[in-house]
Amino acid sequence: MINYLINNTNHQINFCKLNKISIISKSIEKINSDKNILLIYDEKISKKIIQNLLNELKLTGCKTFSLKIKGDKINKNEKSLFYIINFLIKNKFTKKSVIISCGGGVVGDISALASSLYLRGLIYYNIPTTMTAVVDSCIGGKTGINYKGIINSLGTYYHPRNIFILEEVISTIPVREYTAGIAEIIKCGLIDDKKILTYLIKNKRYILDRNFRQVTEICKLTLKSKIKFFLKDIYENNSRLILNFGHTFAHAIEMATENEINKDFIRHGEAVALGILCEIYYSNKKKNNIFNYAKTIFENFNLETTLNIKKNKFNEVQLIENIYRNIFFDKKKIGHFPRYISLKKLSRPKIEEMKDFDLINETILKVLFN
Ligand SMILES: NC(=O)c1ccc[n+]([C@@H]2O[C@H](COP(=O)([O-])OP(=O)(O)OC[C@H]3O[C@@H](n4cnc5c(N)ncnc54)[C@H](O)[C@@H]3O)[C@@H](O)[C@H]2O)c1
């Protein structure tokens, strides 16, 4: 278990098995709720897990509702948000009701946004179901939807009171959703704690085989690293921005590749892996030892290290132009220039501006389209 305080309120991350006397129902019994619970779940999660969860929640004696929504970034929109909010209004939820999100980063970010907006905030829990959600999006309190083609353009900060990382969920995450999240683990290892990379590499087989003991350990190391950054800077004014390592390029890639024809092209974590390589290249003006080191780790965990568009309907020239243009939508920007995280030495990241437009272009070509 990991405990951390935000505004003197305790927040908890639990690693556990889902069973009859699980700590989920115990935790809900302890809080001062109005005994209404809404489980919002991703439609692709195993039916058995959802049924077990609902059975578990019914043991609390609370009135339990459930709402199935779609994952995938294309559904991270106002339609999904208002679907939830209308349900809360219709069923007369109050500030003392509980929302439990059970899904990946998409369902989690939308559910958390709805939880923060409805009556200015009700009680929010999270059960993350992809590796990206487990090691990254479930904590830190960033909520959001994509609007007008801009990633997370609408959002708030709102923290789950409790997070449950369940063994049954870890063992059923699809391979692609598991692998994509490993990029966020590698990110924390590169910018912060070398121990993360050492543990990851040493226990590669166990982690790829989903052995819960080793998975718990690597998740704890990564989550503690993220907690350290965001507790110092909850509203992301300075030091927390470091956690956006790779994201200036990653978001530009995601926005350029997300469309109706190529709906499922790239996962957030996959884009982060590519974005990290781009930001290492840009900061060193070349492929150097850190670039090759990071690339090898990504390859070891089956993450792509160039933008593989062969099987998809993209116009390559147009795509390069769109990625370049999207870099300038960077949300970290404070002046004219987009900002990114440079990495010239391991564990020594810096927030910097990207002023060399030719180098941005070179980076896109040499890293993504090599
Ligand atoms: N709030 C934050 O701090 C934060 C951090 C990182 C990423 N994010 C956001 O998270 C999103 C990406 O998250 P993601 O990669 O988890 O995407 P996602 O939620 O779309 O999940 C990816 C796919 O896996 C499916 N899925 C989820 N759990 C499953 C399970 N257990 N079994 C079978 N299928 C399952 C989903 O339906 C979807 O098709 C992006 O929108 C990104 O902006 C937010």
Image: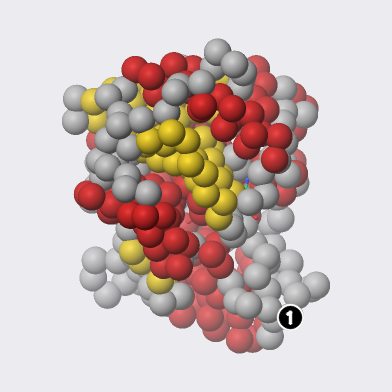
Quadrant, the C terminus: bottom right
Residue at 27%, 75% in the rendered image: 336
Residue placed most toward the observer, 222 or 51: 51
**In the image as oriented, which residue stretches furthest toward the top?**
21
Residue placed most toward the observer, 329 or 339: 329
In the rendered image, residue 200, in percent from the top left (x then y), is placed at 64, 29
Can the viewer see residue 240? no
Secondary structure of the residue carrying tag 1 is: loop
In the rendered image, residue 62, in percent from the top left (x then y), is placed at 42, 28
In the rendered image, residue 366, in percent from the top left (x then y), is placed at 63, 69
Residue at 33%, 26% in the rendered image: 11
Could you tell me the amino acid type at mark 1?
Answer: Lys
Residue at 73%, 44% in the rendered image: 174
Above or below, 161 against 187 in this view is: above
Q: Which residue is mark 1?
A: 313
In the rendered image, residue 220, in percent from the top left (x then y), is placed at 51, 24
Can the viewer see residue 8? yes
**In the image as oriented, which residue stretches furthest toward the right?**
311
Residue 301 lies in quadrant = top right
Residue 29 lies in quadrant = top left
Residue placed most toward the observer, 330 or 52: 52
Instruction: Tell me: 52 left or right of 331.
Output: right
Q: Residues within 10 Å of mark 1 (few under 14, many from 20)?
A: few
Label tally: 1
Residue 184 lies in quadrant = top right
Residue placed most toward the observer, 6 or 81: 81
Above or below, 258 against 214 in this view is: below
Residue at 79%, 73% in the rendered image: 310
Above or below, 242 against 37 in this view is: below
